[in-house]
Image (spheres, grey):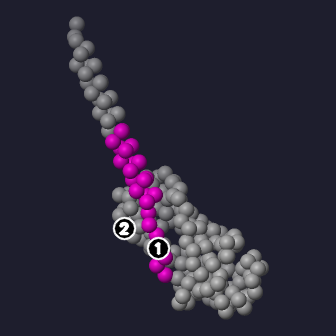
Amino acid sequence: MKSRLPLIVGITSGLLTLVGTGLIAYKWLNKQITDLQNYTTKISRVVVRKISLNELSFDIFMFFKNNSNLTITLAEQVYEVYANDIYITQFVNKAPNTLKAQEESEIGMRITLDPAFLVSKIGINAATLIQDPKNVRIKILMKYKVSVLGVKVEIPPIPWEDSLAYFLGMKK
């Protein structure tokens, strides 16, 4: 009768190797998700497209620093827009953007508003909106979903606030 000891040792070694490898992979992936949540952003530029009584249109570009060791896909961007702390609207961009590992990538979003709608929502007149944009505070709450290794992950929202004058490219 053959000894079962080599078989038991082989199976035990295999199981321990699988568990150990799984634990290492889990810890590594968990660290990458934590690093991903420690991203940084900064507005790189604002490009005014159109200013009129009927349309206010501009592109906002920002740098997004992916601090993880994983190249990720920015799968969805949601921007909630507030003026003088009053909710105005939200914009959604589902066009994918690739954010390379340990690099800063520029992403952009076009925003188009009807000034009359804006005026009615925040309760100021159009002349103030156009003549005194430094006194109109714009806040954008940016919410992102990223795809990492095929799994969608929400990252903490990013608030960003400045005057309408800044968005229109005027000096402070």
Residue drawn at point x = 51 percent, y = 75 percent:
108
Q: Secondary structure at mark 2?
A: loop
Q: Mark 2 sits on what residue?
A: 103
Residue drawn at point x = 46 percent, y = 69 percent:
41
Q: Main secondary structure of the magenta part?
A: helix
* Amino acid at circle 1: Lys
In-front residue for pair 166/152: 166
Q: Mark 1 sits on what residue?
A: 42
Can you give x and y, in whole percent of width and height, for residue 122 in the image?
73, 77
* First reached walking from the N terminus: tag 1 or tag 2: 1
In-front residue for pair 33/11: 33
- Viewer-nearest of discs 1 and 2: 1
* Amino acid at circle 2: Glu
Q: Quadrant of the N terminus?
A: top left
User: Magenta residues?
Assistant: 22-45
Can you give x and y, in whole percent of width and height, for residue 140 in the image?
59, 71
Crowd tier of the residue under label 2, counting other residues whose Cα lies within 10 Å: few below 14, some 14–19, many 20 or above? some
Residue drawn at point x = 32 percent, y = 29 percent:
15
Can you give x and y, in whole percent of width and height, for residue 137 in the image?
63, 78
Q: Is residue 116 left or right of residue 41?
A: right
Q: Quadrant of the C terminus?
A: bottom right
